Amino acid sequence: MSVQTEKQPMSLKSLMIMIMTFALPLAILLIPTNELFTPQIRLYLTITLFAILTFIFGNINQTAVAILLPITYVVIAQAPAAAVFAPWSTYIPWFVIGGLFLANVMERTNLLKRIAYNSILLTGASYNGVIWGLALAGVLLFLLIPGNTVFPLAALAYGLCKALNLNVGKETAGITMAAAISSLLPGWFIFNANYGLLTGLGKGVAGEVNLTWIQYFMYSSVNILFYAFMFWIITKMFKPTVPINAKDYFKEQLEKLGKMSLDEKKILLMSIMLFAFLLTTQYHKIEAGWGFVIFPMLLYFPGFNVATNEDLKNVNYGMAIFTAACMGIGTTAGALGLGKVAAAIIMPILAGKGIMFIFGTVYTMIFSLNFLMTPLAIMSAFTLPLTEIAMSFGINPAAWYMFIQIAIDAIILPYEYVLYLIFFSFGIVKLSDFIKFQAAKTILTVVFIFTVLIPFWRMIGFLMM
């Protein structure tokens, strides 16, 4: 006999959000059309705004909306299916699947923990040692599973703080913020799905933007300085009130893991093969992203036999569908000519202004939008028109996408970016400490962009086309 649960009545706040989700997009249909703002573009904007609002409010299942989004573009807006579903012919959604799958395998075999524990022991396991150990672990894990290190590093930081019986304060804030940026900021210099998403969203204007894994690293390598600088800032901003030594804790954790298993060694062998593939992309001419799909799947083949059916079954396929749907927003807009419409509106504001003014204006815009929209929603809605602007001023779209990826990390409050919210949700960081650190990071990022990054790009001839 099953127990039937009663549905809870919708609150007034939820009702208002639901009304806004439908009313605001429908209001676009009241805007008159002309030769530039065609009925087809008006329908596209109506559908897109509805989807983005659901992504912001989370009031309708994200994956369900992501499945329906490309279908409504084709059926209702009469957009070309080849453009709408073009993202599935790129490596990006498959890159997401491959990365999530490999993360599952590495988590199950304890390789993720082993790398993290050894990284922290290597740097001494004092308080500062833990901070720098997280910096090292973040890079090593990001190399293996780009963009999928948030949950293991968040759990590691929380477990460490609890094991050391640390009260909520400077120590827990420092460890948690170090884990947070170690899971996200390596994407500023290591190839990842977010960058691929941006190139896909801007493809309708900029065309193909292909960088090898090595080229991406070379052009963004100066960001390593900022990455290291932020960990130094943490050691100064969150100085511990009492001495901390976690060496015994991590040694004990490694002893529990035992000797490295044969499966872990096989995964490392596969990773070496993957890196060899990434380092030779200029010779075999295969896009780097495909390697993150092909090589992890080899773990099912004879000679490896590491992966289980559960590893593939537990992949969050909804994230791949969502990523492809977001990319479809850009490819569809490009096919309909929306980028030119947006550029026609924005260009007069930026006309006659210098490159620094353009970068500063866009950074400020994205920082402000973060209070209202998720980073993925911002990228989905604004990458195409922003790319149109960059192309109009002769800015290299590859550099532009790197800049946007940095700008979306400019937040102040936890709710602005769900990946930072995960770290905050463990309850071991005071809101005041979170805000203080993120505000400092945002300001320092601006200084770094304009005094180091852009001059570096100019010096190597990467900034302009």
Image: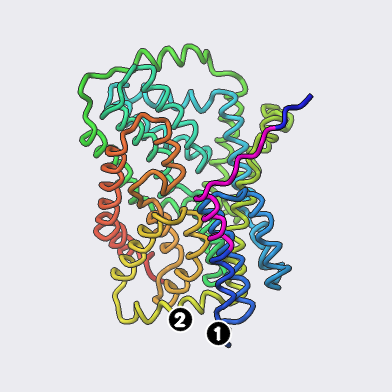
Residue 129 seen by the camera? yes
Query: Which residue in the structure is indicated by mark 2?
Result: 344
The three-letter code of the residue at mark 2 reads Ala
Q: Where, quadrant-wise, is the C terminus in this rendering?
A: bottom left
Residue 166 left/right relative to 237: right
Q: Where, quadrant-wise, is the N terminus in this rendering?
A: top right
- Examine the image and state in which quarter residue 324 appears: bottom right
Query: Which residue in the structure is indicated by mark 1?
Result: 36
User: Callout 2: helix, strand or loop?
Assistant: helix
The three-letter code of the residue at mark 1 reads Leu
Q: What label does residue 298 carry, if any?
A: none
Image location of residue 25, percent across then percent down: 57, 67
First-in-chain label (2 vs 1): 1
Measured Cα–Cα span from mark 2 to mark 1: 10 Å
Image location of residue 287, percent across then percent down: 59, 54
User: Callout 1: helix, strand or loop?
Assistant: loop
Image location of residue 218, percent across then percent down: 40, 53
Magenta stretch containing residue 21, yes or no? yes
Residue contact at pointers 2 and 1, CB within 8 angstroms: yes
In the image, what residue occupies the spot 26% across and 52% down? 443
Q: How does the figure colour the protein chain or chains? A: rainbow
Q: Is residue 346 positioned above or below 303 on the image?
A: below
Image location of residue 426, percent across then percent down: 42, 30
Instruction: State whether the magenta stretch is mostly helix, strand or loop.
Output: helix
- Examine the image and state in which quarter residue 110 appears: top right
Q: Nearer the viewer, residue 194 or 70?
A: 70
Residue 419 left/right relative to 262: left
Residue 284 seen by the camera? no
Q: Bounds of the magenta span?
A: 5-22
